[in-house]
Amino acid sequence: MSDPYETTEEHLERLLGRALNSFDLPDATVERLESALAHSTSLHSSHHSAGLHRETFKHAFLLSDGSSLTLWELAHNAGRDGATQHELYTEAADVRLAASRLPRQGAADAFGVSGADADGRDPQGEDAGLDTDLEILAALMATRPSPAPRIFIPDNSADHARRVLRRAENADRPGPDAALRLGTAVAHQITQAFGRQCSVEGRDAGFTLYEHAFLLRDSSEVSLWEVEHTATPDGRHMCEVYETERAAREAMELRAQVR
């Protein structure tokens, strides 16, 4: 339910202000929200387990032209300091995908890092640690199964491509030519190609690889390969984008720092 003492303008300002990824919202969406006349908030889903929690909220807005617009909010405490963090999405599918990326209790055990000491060394010896690293490398470079048929969705695809390129932090990310070509995208599909938790220099780190496939106006197809990981010196989340799957997987291999 909405706060009866909070205006729609105040609610929207609070919503955008606390979202870590509000800059990723399409400009057209933010502009439409400026004409919001009324709003309603409801809890869509909730999960609590062993100190971890996540909730999904649906924020519906009535606009001045009589249309409506929905924002999906993910609230969770899966960050490094345990504080509640907020993320905003325009599609239910996107918020579900974001929720699926969050770590879950027991994930470390599932990925075979529960036997490590505080400094990341395996108490059973260096050979065991080397075997674990080789398993990580094998998973990172594993051949993907045969892809399912493409299901392209026309949903501001050129803007989606722009946002993917904008959040890339790697120096060898796709350049202006790729951005110009992707400006003609009319539909797209997002697929998770890989995901794993592992230990990097004694710290837990997560790697996820996504393929952003685009259908262009001339009926050709092109993909961007996005690597999301926390194998950074301070453990922060980082995004890298590449034009080929091979380059993306080689970047993950390098980040994993296999001995």
Image (tube, rainbow, N blue to C red):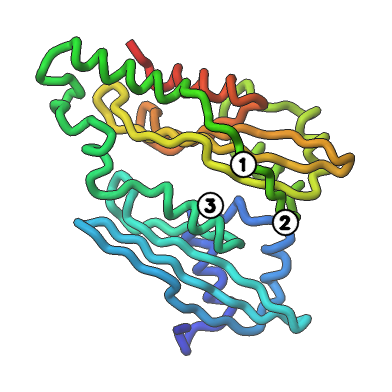
Label 2, label 1: how far apart the Cα atoms are: 20 Å
User: Going 39% across and 28% down the picture, which residue do you hit?
Assistant: 231
Q: Is residue 236 above or below residue 4?
A: above
Residue occupied by mark 3: 21
Determine crowd level at label 2: few under 14, some 14-19, many 20+ residues with C-alpha closer than 10 A.
some
Determine crowd level at label 3: few under 14, some 14-19, many 20+ residues with C-alpha closer than 10 A.
few
Q: Which mark is residue 155?
A: 2
Label 2, label 3: how far apart the Cα atoms are: 19 Å
Quadrant for residue 39, please give it. Answer: bottom right
User: Going 74% across and 34% down the picture, which residue do you hit?
Assistant: 222
Asked which secondary structure carries label 3, the reply is loop
Tag 1: amino acid: Ala
User: Going 45% across and 72% down the picture, which residue do you hit?
Assistant: 44
Asked which secondary structure carries label 2, the reply is loop
User: Going 34% across and 34% down the picture, which residue do you hit?
Assistant: 197
Question: Could you tell me if residue 159 is visible in this image?
Answer: no
Asked which secondary structure carries label 1, the reply is loop
Percent position (x, y) of residue 97? Answer: 49, 52
Tag 3: amino acid: Asn
Q: Going by the picture, which residue comes out furthest to the left?
A: 123
Tell me the quadrant of the picture where the N terminus can be found: bottom left
Tag 2: amino acid: Asp
* Label located before the other in sequence (2 or 3): 3
* Label located before the other in sequence (3 or 1): 3
Tell me the quadrant of the picture where the C terminus can be found: top left
Percent position (x, y) of residue 163? Answer: 66, 44
Q: Nearer the viewer, residue 8 or 26?
A: 26
Front of the two marks 2 and 3:
2
Q: Going by the picture, which residue comes out furthest to the bottom?
A: 4
Quadrant for residue 132, please give it. Answer: top left
Residue occupied by mark 1: 148
Percent position (x, y) of residue 23? Answer: 60, 52
